[in-house]
C-alpha cells in the first residue's frame, strides 16, 4: 500500500487535512484506531458560529443547539451575560460530535481519501533515515503503509510527534483533565452556555453547562492537572457540582478526557511529519476550545503538504510554511491566551468575585471575551497589574 | 507497579499524554503499560476517573 500522504487520526483536524489533500488530487489514506469515528465523545462540543461557517457548510443534522449567548458565574454565584457569537469564539453552536466527526470523515472520503477504521498506527517506518510510512495493526493483523509524509492528527495521546522526535508530552500544569455528563433536567436553559468559575468548583479551569436541545445539556468541569489533589478529582467534583446545581438531573451519558492548555510547540513539523489539532497542542489554553483551531490547522497543513509533495520535498524547511501560516494569527493568539491562563489560575475566589462584580454595571451583553478582558483591565488595574503587558 | 482498573477506565487517553517515558498506549478501549514505566505516578493524578494507581 502506497500513498502520497498518510493521516493518523480521523477527528476534525485529520479529516480536514485529508479532505484538503484529496481535493488537491493527492492520494491520501486516513487511519482511525477506533471502530467508530466520533465516539466516544471527549468534548463539551461548543464552537463559534463564525469560525465554523468559515470552514464548512453548516448542516442542521449536527447542530444540537443554536445559542443566544453565555452566562458567566463567579464563585459566589453572581453572574453576567455575554452576547451571542462573542464569548471568545467558544459559544455559538453546540455540536453533536458523533455525527459531526463522522460527516467530516465522509466528506474526506467522498473527496477521494481512503479511510481505514479499527486501524492503529504502531510506529513510523524509516528507509535510509527518512520517514516512509507507518506500521499499522488492524484486527490483529500487522501491515505496512508507505507514504513519504505522515500527518499526526492523533489527538491528545499523540504518538506520531514523539516517534518523530517532537516532544509533545504535556506537563500536568498544561493539561485540563475533564469529566462530563449528558444531563436531562427541567432547569436547563437551552439558549445559553453557562461557565462557572471557582477554585473549589473547578481548580484551574471551569465548570460548564452547554445545552444540547430541550432541557438537555453537557454538564462538565475541568481541573488543571497540577491542581488535581486526589485520585479521580474531576469526576468527584462533577458529582458535587451536580448535587449543588442540578440535584434532580438525570444522567444519560458520561464523557471524560484531557484538553491541552499548553504553550505553543516550538516545532509542529519535522522531516516527513506534520502535527495538527490536539496532537500539536492547538486547543485554546483559555477556553479549552479546539475544534475550529484544529480544523483550521488541518486545512493549512493539507495545503502545505500538497505543495511539498508536488515539489517532491518533504523536509522540514519545505513544511515550515505550515507553521508560519499557523502562527499568524492563530498561534500567536493562543500563546497570548496561554499567558492569560497562567495569570488567571493564580487568582483567589475573592479576586474572581471582585472581577465579576466590577462588571455588573457594565453593558456586558454587547461584549465578547476580548471586550470583557479589556473592561476588566480598565476597572481593576491593581488586581490585573500582571496583565498590563499582555496585548488583547 | 502501575495498575489500570479497566472497570473504571473510560479510555480517554489523558494519561498517555502526560507520560514522560511514553510508556502508555490507548488501544481502542484499554490502556497498555509497557516496560518503560518508571511508576512516577503523574498519570494517576491526571486520570479524570481515578482508574490508575501505583501499587507497591
Image (cartoon, rainbow, N blue to C red):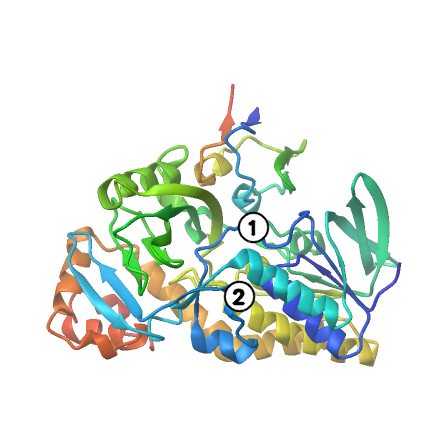
Residue A240 quadrant:
top left
| Chain of the residue under the numbered disc 2 shown in the image | A
Disc 2 target residue = A61
Task: Give the image location of residue A379, x and y in percent.
Answer: 15, 73
Q: Secondary structure at mark 1?
A: loop
Residue A292 lies left or right of residue A212; in this view the side is right
User: Residue A169: which disc?
Assistant: 1
> Is the residue A64 above or below the residue A330 in the image?
above
* Crowding near the residue tagged with mark 1, few <14, some 14–19, many ≥20 C-alpha atoms within 10 Å: many
* Towards the viewer: A81 or A154: A81
> Is the residue A385 above or below the residue A183 in the image?
below
Residue A295 quadrant:
bottom right
Going 23% across and 55% down the picture, which residue do you hit? A347
Q: Quadrant of the N terminus of chain A?
A: bottom right
Cα–Cα gap, marks 1 and 2: 36 Å
Residue A194 in view (yes/no) = yes
Residue B48 quadrant:
top left
Task: Give the image location of residue A228, x and y in percent.
Answer: 37, 40
* Towards the viewer: A228 or A39: A39
* Towards the viewer: A3 or A57: A57
Going 15% across and 53% down the picture, which residue do you hit? A350
Amino acid at each position: 500500500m502506497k500513498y502520497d500522504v498518510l493521516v493518523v487520526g480521523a477527528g476534525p483536524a485529520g479529516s480536514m487535512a485529508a479532505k484538503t489533500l484529496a481535493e488537491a488530487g493527492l492520494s491520501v489514506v486516513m487511519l482511525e484506531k477506533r471502530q467508530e469515528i466520533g465516539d466516544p465523545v471527549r468534548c463539551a462540543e461548543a464552537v463559534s458560529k463564525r469560525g465554523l461557517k468559515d470552514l464548512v457548510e453548516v448542516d442542521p443534522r449536527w447542530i444540537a443547539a443554536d445559542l443566544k449567548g453565555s452566562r458567566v458565574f463567579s464563585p459566589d454565584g453572581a453572574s453576567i451575560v455575554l452576547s451571542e457569537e462573542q464569548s471568545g469564539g467558544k459559544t455559538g453552536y453546540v455540536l453533536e460530535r458523533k455525527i459531526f466527526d463522522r460527516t467530516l470523515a465522509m466528506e474526506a472520503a467522498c473527496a477521494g481519501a481512503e479511510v481505514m477504521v479499527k486501524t492503529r498506527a504502531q510506529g513510523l517506518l524509516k528507509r535510509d533515515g527518512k520517514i516512509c510510512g507507518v506500521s499499522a495493526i488492524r484486527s490483529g493483523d500487522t501491515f505496512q503503509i508507505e507514504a513519504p509524509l505522515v500527518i499526526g492528527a492523533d489527538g491528545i495521546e499523540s504518538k506520531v510527534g514523539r516517534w518523530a522526535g517532537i516532544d509533545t508530552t504535556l506537563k500536568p500544569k498544561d493539561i485540563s483533565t475533564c469529566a462530563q455528563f449528558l444531563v436531562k433536567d427541567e432547569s436547563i436553559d437551552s439558549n445559553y452556555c453557562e461557565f462557572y468559575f471557582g477554585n473549589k468548583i473547578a481548580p484551574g479551569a471551569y465548570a460548564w453547562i452547554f445545552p444540547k436541545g430541550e432541557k438537555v445539556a453537557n454538564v462538565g468541569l475541568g481541573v488543571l492537572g497540577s491542581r488535581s489533589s486526589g485520585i479521580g478529582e474531576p469526576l468527584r467534583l462533577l458529582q458535587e457540582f451536580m448535587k449543588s446545581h442540578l440535584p434532580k438531573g438525570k444522567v444519560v451519558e458520561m464523557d471524560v478526557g484531557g484538553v491541552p492548555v499548553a504553550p505553543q510547540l516550538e516545532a509542529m513539523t519535522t522531516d516527513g511529519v506534520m502535527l495538527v489539532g490536539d496532537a500539536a497542542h492547538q486547543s485554546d489554553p483559555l477556553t479549552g476550545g479546539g475544534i475550529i483551531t484544529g480544523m483550521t490547522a488541518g486545512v493549512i497543513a493539507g495545503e502545505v503538504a500538497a505543495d511539498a509533495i508536488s515539489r517532491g520535498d518533504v523536509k522540514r524547511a519545505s513544511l515550515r510554511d505550515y507553521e508560519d501560516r499557523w502562527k499568524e494569527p492563530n498561534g500567536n493568539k493562543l500563546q497570548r491566551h496561554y499567558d492569560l491562563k497562567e495569570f488567571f489560575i493564580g487568582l483567589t475566589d475573592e479576586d474572581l468575585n471582585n472581577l465579576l462584580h466590577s462588571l455588573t454595571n457594565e453593558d456586558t451583553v454587547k461584549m465578547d471575551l476580548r471586550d470583557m478582558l479589556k473592561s476588566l483591565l480598565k476597572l481593576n488595574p491593581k488586581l490585573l497589574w500582571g496583565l498590563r503587558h499582555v496585548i488583547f | 507497579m502501575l495498575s489500570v482498573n479497566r472497570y473504571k477506565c473510560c479510555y480517554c487517553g489523558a494519561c498517555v499524554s502526560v507520560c514522560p517515558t511514553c510508556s502508555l498506549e490507548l488501544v481502542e478501549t484499554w490502556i497498555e503499560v509497557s516496560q518503560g514505566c518508571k511508576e512516577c505516578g503523574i498519570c494517576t493524578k491526571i486520570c479524570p476517573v481515578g482508574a490508575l494507581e501505583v501499587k507497591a
